[in-house]
Image (cartoon, helix red, strand yellow):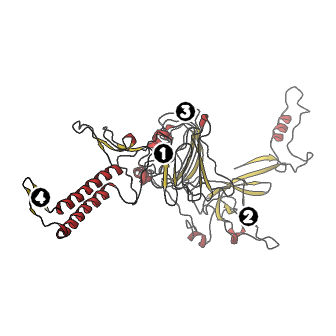
Amino acid sequence: MGYWKINSNVSKGSKGLKTNTSKMTGGIATPTLVKMLIKGAIPSLKAAEFYELEPAEVMDVILEEDQLLETEDGIKNWGHMGWIYARKINSEHNDPISDLSPIGPLDPNHEEYPLVGELVILVTYDNRTYYSNKINVFNSANSNFRPNRSGNRPTELVEADGKFDHFEADINIRKLWPYEGDNIYQGRFGNSIRFGSNIVPDSHGDDGEAQNSPNIIFRTGQLLDADDFDKGEYVEELKNSPFKPVKEDINADGSSIWMTTDQSVKLDIEGSNAVNHVFMTSKQSDDQPKNGGKQIVLNSDRITFNTKQGKILGFSHDGIGFSTQKSFTVDADETLDMNVGGGSGGPGSTLAMTGTTLLMTSPTNAGLSIGEDRAILSSPCPSILTLADYANITACEGAQLHLDDCAGIKDNQGSFLRVGGKALGITGYVFGRDDMGQQHLVYGEELTNILDSICNSFVELGETILNLAGIPTGAGPSGPISGGPTNTPAIEAWKAGVETIRARLCDLLMKPE
């Protein structure tokens, strides 16, 4: 295929395109004039250039340093990297391959490297040949390998047909499913960029359609995770349907970036969302990509943000939410600062974390401060600590729970246990037990003194009884009692027994420091 053009190297005085208007001033044209006009309309070979477009078979692609030719100075010609050796199918049929010269790409900014054995279009312009598009032989995005179209080849090339250093053909790599008005760029390996829209109903799982809905969809790794999202049947359907195009899948593709303006993105977060995501549900209104609107959705096995020198900044009008089934960690070699509860009312609580001695604190609001030997949870009154039905508080030996004025435990039925307060003791109440009423247990130093006095009374009573010489009666003493020193062991045993009781009472009521 080719076309003609006026040869710019031919002077105006040479015999080129001939016209004669001197005789076209009116009247009936003579036969001679007609012949002159016809002859003038036909370009002469000397006055025209012929531009040829011809298919060619790729014999080699320069992708390695040792394939580069050297200049006269013995320097590698790096400008030939990505060039090809190709033999024209018609005009160079059966020509020796050794006579071929490197051919560069037509477009210097968009280079699409063919495979050996594929067919490309060669174009000659200004006595220089370039290669352009691959020829769509098999309608495959992966490979259009069709060797032996330009004539005989050396045995070593024939034996290498279909064998590449790294590339392996994959017939399951498919072209993207086209939608009305799309502009699609796709590679050989299941990677693509679609400049499209949401104007076609159910084009990407969105039930609706919107005219003003441009989108850009990046994806790489065609259906690599299909089995993890129950898309195995879809993969088998493609295998059994030759040349059937494939649709992007935000979940089953390897990695994806979807940039949309008015489109629901059916992102599956079941495997990554926390089992208990009450904060995401309540604080962020359970907002997800499926809700549509203007959004950018990234999905892969790992997403990394890194700055070599500067910062990572994030801003959000309606909130920021994170959810994970594993751990959420932050490492900071210097400080971690937070401002909590600012808003229109002015500055809120400032959180500054330095080193490892402080996890979270807030002088004006609420905070958790963790040091080497203690943890402090604080908040302004009224303070509420709410735990789930399976939560518990566990402390090491010697732990204390301290609350100003009084402390208490209350359940949702109305029963309670209060320590301290105006009663200066322990008050218990059991809901539904009117027969018990509100029970008040006095404790502390006064109760200990009372019990101590009782113990002293027992000691005095024992000494008095065992020291009596006789039992007084109306008729006089009943008779001598073996008192005095002979009862000393009994008295000491009595005292020891009372002291044992006293010690047990003290241990019960007042733990020693």
Q: Nearer the viewer, mark 1 or mark 3?
A: 1
Dot 2 lies on which element? helix
Q: Which residue is mark 2?
A: 80
Task: Give the alpha-carbon distance from disc 2 to disc 1, as whole Å.
Answer: 45 Å
Q: Nearer the viewer, residue 54 or 305?
A: 305
Q: Which of marks 2 and 4 precedes in the sequence?
A: 2
Looking at the image, do the residues carrying marks 4 and 2 touch, with CB atoms under 8 Å apart?
Answer: no
Task: Give the alpha-carbon distance from disc 4 to disc 2, as whole Å.
Answer: 133 Å
Q: Nearer the viewer, mark 4 or mark 2?
A: 4
* Residue 41 drawn at (x, y percent): 81, 40
Q: Nearer the viewer, mark 2 or mark 1?
A: 1
Q: Which of marks 3 and 4 precedes in the sequence?
A: 3
| Kind of residue at disc 4 | Ile
Q: Which residue is mark 3?
A: 210
Of all residues, the one furthest to the front in this rendering is 476
Task: Give the alpha-carbon distance from disc 1 to disc 4, as whole Å.
Answer: 99 Å
Q: Which of marks 2 and 3 precedes in the sequence?
A: 2
| Kind of residue at disc 3 | Ala
| Kind of residue at disc 2 | His
Q: Residues within 10 Å of mark 1 (few under 14, many from 20)?
A: some
* Residue 156 drawn at (x, y percent): 60, 73
Task: Give the alpha-carbon distance from disc 3 to disc 2, as whole Å.
Answer: 47 Å
Q: Which residue is mark 4?
A: 471
Dot 4 lies on which element? strand
Task: Give the alpha-carbon distance from disc 4 to disc 3, as whole Å.
Answer: 114 Å
Quadrant housing the C terminus: bottom left
| Kind of residue at disc 1 | Leu
Q: Which residue is mark 1?
A: 267
Q: Nearer the viewer, residue 278 or 91?
A: 278
Looking at the image, do the residues carrying marks 4 and 3 touch, with CB atoms under 8 Å apart?
Answer: no
